[in-house]
Each structure stands twice: as C-alpha cells, then as structure tokens.
Amino acid sequence: MNKRADIDPNKIIQVEDLSEPLIYSVEAFTSPEYAQDERDRLWSQVWQHAGRVEEIPEVGNFITYDIMDESIVIVRSGPETLKAFYNVCSHRGRQLVDVPEGAHSACGRKQNFVCGFHGWTYNLEGKCTRILDKEDWKGILNDERTKLNEIKVDTWGGWIWINMNPDCEPLLEYLLPASDLLSQFEFEKMRYHWRQWVVFDCNWKTALEAFMEPYHVEGTHPQLCVYGDFYAWSKAQGLHGHDGFDSKNPEENTSAATTTVTRAGKGPDARKTIAQMQDDFWETIRGSTTPTLVNAAKRLVDELPEGTPAHEVHEHWYESAKRDDAARGVIWPTIDPDKLAKAGLAWHIFPNMSFIPGLTFLLGYRTRPYGNDPNKCIFEAYALERYPEGGEPKAPWVYAEPTEEKWRKVLAQDFSNMAAVQKGMRNRGFRGALPNPHQEQKITNFHRNLARYMGRGSPELIEK
Ligand code: FES
Ligand SMILES: [Fe+2]
C-alpha cells in the first residue's frame, strides 16, 4: 500500500508557489508523537540511501542500516545481485547481525548468517538452511515461514537504496528529476575520501536543514564572505530541491556553468581569489574540492597574466586541473553544459540526504532519528572523490566528537547551531519558522512534501 496515495489532499494546505512568505510550526521537530508517526508514515514509505555499492564489493559482503526501530541487512548475494532483509531472525526475533559496541552499523563478509540465540542459519538469499530439531514443529516450518523478510533494494549514483514499502514506485522515478539532472556526474565512479558520524541534540531535520541553504554563510561562516556574498536561488524539484548562487543584480551573475562548483571569487584578481578560496576550502572543509583543483588554482598566478578576466581564469583553471587529473588516470565526466547549469550548487533528496556535487567530488550529509527521540539524531558527513583505479583510501565510518579538530572549521561552525536551534524551537516564545521565500525554498518544499506523507504540518501562507 502506498501511503502517499492515502493522504487526503483536502487536509493539506496546498501551497504551490513557494516564493510566497510561508510559516510552519515546530511540531515536526519537537513532538514525540510526530517522531513516532514518522516511523510508519515516512521512513517505511520512502527510498533511503543505506550505503555505497563499493562497501560490499564481494559476494557475502554485507552492511547494516538502522532507522528508528528497523534494522536492515544489505548483502551482495551474487556478483551482480544485492539483497536487503529486515535484520531479524524468524525464530524468536533476535536481531540477526549485531552492531559492534560504539559503532552505528555493522559490516563484514559471511557465507551464512547464523543467529546467536539458537543457531538458525540463513544463506545469502535469505533462505533458512539450518533449524535445530526442525521436526519438533510437526512439519509447519516451510521456506516461506522461515526465510528472512526481504525488502526492496536498488542502486543509483553508487549509493545503495532501500524501501520498506513493497508497492513503492521504482527508485529512478522516485528520484526524478534529480536522477536525470545529475546522472552525468557519474557519482558511481567516486569513492569515499572520508566519512564521519556523531550524535547531535537536535531533530534529524534541524541537522539536515543546516546544510540546505547558503543563506547562513554570513551569520555562521563569516570568514567565507571574502569570497562572495553567497546570495542563492533555491527551488523545488518535485519531492527534492536544489539551490545555486545568484545575484541581487543580474548583471553580476557569473555564467551558470561556473556557479555549479564555485564562484570566481570577489576581488580584483581572480587568479588569487580562486587560489585562496580553494586552499581555504581544502583546509577548513576537506571537501567541496580536490587536491588537483587546489594545486591547479595555486598555479594560476604563474600561468596567467595579471588582469585576465575572471571567466577566463576560471576556464584555464578547469582545463589545467582536468589535464592533471587525466595524467593520473582520473577522467572527468562530460556534462551537457545546459544540464550542468541546471544542476546548481547543492541538492536535497527527500527525505534525509543533502549533497554538494562536483565533477570530481561530492560532499554529502545524511541525518536520521536517534531512536524515537525527536531531540536527538545521528548525523553523518562524507566526502567522495574520483580516484585512479584502485587508488582510493580506506575510509571506514569514524565516530568523531563535534570539534573543530575532528571536523575542521566550517562544519564545526555549522555544528554550533544544532542544539541551539533545537532548544530555541522548544521555546514557547517561538512563533514558527519563517523560511526565506527566495533563498530557502528547498526547506519550505521539504516541509510541504513531508506534510504530504505525514498528513499534517504543511507550511501556510502568512496573512499580510
Ligand atoms: S531467535 Fe534466532 S535462532 Fe532463536
Ligand atoms: Fe554551513
């Protein structure tokens, strides 16, 4: 049953024009009942990225993915086949695969899954292959009754996606138009550079939304303002949304293609501002760029004469970085300039994925509820990069306290808002969220779509 079709549209205020000033309540962030309802109305109905394909390269490799009460095992059952099962033994319900102490997921390689309680054993297809004293059940234990409970699994962009709704739409349809606009980036050819996680004292939406708009740059990352004003457009794309750099003065806009990754920087000498900005991004984020791009940017001042127009500097930088990468076996994808321009800067994939895509990198975020607590979440961030064949580093999940030392300056600045926003939203003096009608439409769209699943809480027009 597809719950989306069940929702009575008359109960939801339909606000199609997200550029109008809208308000939404904090129920979705603070209510324990709402958090509990998300389990049935949201998480059991949507496609969720549960991991990356490269995490399970060999037959028998598996990972687990937990969402509220549900735990799921995803296993490579054959060279070209992935399977996903609820992580529970069919006998008396012991969780089949344990998550190690201090970790948020399990991974490994097995030929069989053996339950730690009474030893029932399952093969990679989920079939129960060993039951102690099976005859005691008087013949009622058939394969159907004892197999692991299977759920939908698919891949896109190198991510593994799961869906607990047996009647869900196909993944590629669910992801539209993002899957179309972004397919040429070939994210499936990227590999983890690093990945870290932490638990925050805030709702999973509070944490995710901190990465869904550049409107916060001046207030949260003032040091980045030397590179531009970070004014952004923000648009709904069906269930999903994206944004990109904009200008209050249309004549100042750089070409759409260059806004995908970064602006040329502000200041008289683009050679220097690009180099500074790239160096700064690498040092303070360790993402949103690559060593190749940083090094090519640092050479600009030697390779180009003073006074070279910004767009020519940008073009030269890209061309030389592309050559450097090709020389080490990293071939850039060819992207239709129109699609590149339309892709924008950063994407939200409903409900809990956010990322900044680049031609050779991606900076991604995933947030999830922590148990049933609306005031806690698991936050994960990761950087992907294109590497020469076999040249990727080993980058397992690392738990990292939310300090500047562990996460570098920019993310640590973002983290400083998490618990404070959650606390503020619980304050009886808060009247409801007032997202920026131009720069935060992604967030308003998120709440509109969330309301469609949840049956309540749609943003409302503000009476003048
Ligand atoms: S609960 Fe798994 S074998 Fe008994
Ligand atoms: Fe930020």
Image (cartoon, rainbow, N blue to C red):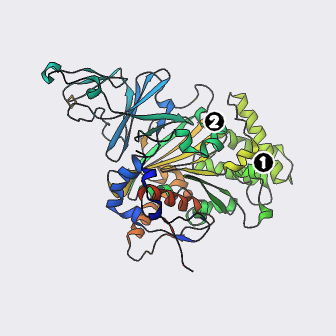
Q: Mark 1 — residue?
A: 314
**Badge 2 residue CB within 8 Å of ligand 2:** no
Viewer-nearest residue: 35 or 57: 35
Tell me the quadrant of the picture where the N terminus can be found: top left
280 left or right of 393 in image: right
Residue type at mark 2: give it: Glu
Residue 36, horizontal then vertical, whole percent: 33, 55
Residue 192, horizontal then vertical, whole percent: 53, 36
Graded by Cα atoms within 10 Å as few (under 14), some (14 to 19) or many (20 or more), the crowding at tag 2 reads some
Q: Earlier in the sequence, mark 2 or mark 1?
A: 2
Q: SS class of the residue under badge 2?
A: loop
Quadrant for residue 153, please give it.
top left
Residue type at mark 1: give it: His
Q: SS class of the residue under badge 1?
A: helix
Viewer-nearest residue: 250 or 313: 250
46 left or right of 40 in image: right
Identify whether 17 is placed above or below 429.
Answer: above
Q: Which quadrant does ligand 1 occupy?
A: top left
Viewer-nearest residue: 18 or 100: 18
Q: Is residue 230 visible?
A: no
Identify whether 99 is placed above or below 231.
Answer: above
Q: Is residue 93 visible?
A: yes
Q: Mark 2 — residue?
A: 186
Residue 189, horizontal then vertical, whole percent: 60, 32
Which residue is drawn at the image coordinates 70% and 34% (left, top)?
Answer: 332
For marks 2 and 1, give the CA distance. Answer: 22 Å
Residue 330, horizontal then vertical, whole percent: 67, 30
Quadrant for residue 294, please give it.
top right
